[in-house]
Structure formats: structure tokens, C-alpha cells
Image (cartoon, rainbow, N blue to C red):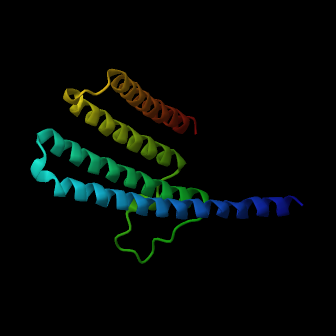
């Protein structure tokens, strides 16, 4: 009976596979949004001042970071929770994709979230002259600081757990 339960639990990891396929579809939606934003940026470039240009570029970087975050979750999550990915025969296969453990995944995710948060904060600062709400700006700063502190605490706890092993 124990072997049957263990086998059932082991096979149940494949329930996660559709989640990762869904994230690939979400990545395609993000690509579409990136294309729309890029088209808007390029087609209105003549009318942009320096701030608008920087904000447009930051919007593209933000979407790119978000896409990178989704890729990290797809590959690392699948590799850690579903099945090993066979990288053989793929000369351009990035090394990190098969070497990120759960602790590394958490750190990469939080680092990406901090970067995305920093871009949102920078966008808000760039819009100060356009009447950005002080309350909103305060919350953006608080949220960003929470993400940064969380990242430091996570890295510190991971380092402590490495020492105890």
C-alpha cells in the first residue's frame, strides 16, 4: 500500500506540467504586449521628449524583465518539480537552465521582482513633473524596500542553511 501511495504522489508531479505550458502561452501574450508597446514607442518617437523616450525604453525593459522572469519560472520550475530536461544536442542551451535549484530559483525570482519594482519606481520618479500622486509614490518606495529587504533576508537564510549542512 505504501509503495502505491508513493508511486501515486510521484506521478502527481505531472499535474504541474500544464501550469508551465500555460506560462508559455502567457509569455506569448507578453510578447504581443511588447510588440504593441514597441510599435507605439517607434511610431510616436518624433513626438517624444527626453522623458517620454526614457519612459518608453523603461516600459520595454520592464516587459523584457517580466518575460525573463517567466522563463526562469518555466525552466527552473519544470526541472525542479516535474522532470529533468535533456540538454544534450542543444549547443546553445544556457547553462543555468539545468543548474538552478529551488534556493537559486527563489533568489532569481526575487532579484527579477526587485528589478521590475525598481523600474516601476523609476518610471514614477520620471513622472514627478507630471503630477504623480505622492501617496502612490510612497507606496511604490515601501513596496520596493520590502522586496529588497526580503531578498537580503532570503539570501542570508539560504547562506545560513548552507552552513548548517
The quadrant of the rendering that contains the C terminus is: top right
Across the whole image, how many numbered discs are drawn on residues? 0
| Residue toward you, 109 or 29 | 29
Residue in view at x 83 percent, y 62 percent: 3
Q: Is 112 on the left-hand or right-hand side of 82?
A: left
Query: Residue 108 appears at what percent x and percent y?
Result: 43, 46
- Judged left or right of residue 90, residue 20 is right
Q: Residue at left 39%, top 57%?
A: 30
Q: Residue at x 30, y 58 (%)?
A: 36
Q: Position of residue 147 (x, y in %)?
A: 43, 32
Q: Is residue 74 above or below residue 113?
A: below
Compare residues 23 and 96 and report the one nearer the observer. Answer: 23
Q: Quadrant of the N terminus?
A: bottom right
Q: Nearer the viewer, residue 101 or 136?
A: 136
Q: Nearer the viewer, residue 165 or 140?
A: 140
Image position of 87 with respect to 54: above or below: below
| Residue 128 image-quadrant placement | top left
In the image, what residue occupies the spot 36% across and 37% down? 117
Left or right for 124, reference 52: right
Q: Residue 57: image x %, image y %? A: 22, 48
Q: Residue furthest right?
A: 1
Give x and y (percent) for residue 155: 46, 35
In this picture, is 131 found above or below 92?
A: above
Q: Is residue 165 shown left or right of residue 72?
A: right
Amino acid at each position: 500500500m505504501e509503495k502505491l501511495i508513493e508511486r501515486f504522489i510521484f506521478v502527481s508531479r505531472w499535474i504541474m506540467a500544464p501550469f508551465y505550458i500555460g506560462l508559455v502561452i502567457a509569455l506569448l501574450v507578453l510578447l504581443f504586449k511588447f510588440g504593441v508597446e514597441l510599435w507605439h514607442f517607434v511610431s510616436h518617437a518624433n513626438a517624444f521628449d527626453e522623458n517620454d523616450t526614457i519612459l518608453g525604453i523603461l516600459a520595454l525593459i520592464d516587459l523584457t524583465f517580466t518575460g525573463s522572469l517567466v522563463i526562469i519560472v518555466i525552466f527552473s520550475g519544470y526541472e525542479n518539480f516535474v522532470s529533468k530536461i535533456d540538454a544534450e544536442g542543444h549547443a546553445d542551451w544556457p547553462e543555468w537552465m539545468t543548474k538552478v535549484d529551488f534556493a537559486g530559483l527563489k533568489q532569481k525570482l526575487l532579484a527579477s521582482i526587485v528589478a521590475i519594482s525598481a523600474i516601476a519606481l523609476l518610471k514614477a520618479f520620471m513622472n514627478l513633473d507630471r503630477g504623480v500622486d505622492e501617496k502612490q509614490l510612497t507606496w511604490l518606495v515601501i513596496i520596493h524596500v520590502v522586496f529588497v529587504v526580503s531578498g537580503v533576508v532570503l539570501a542570508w537564510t539560504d547562506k545560513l542553511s548552507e552552513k548548517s549542512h
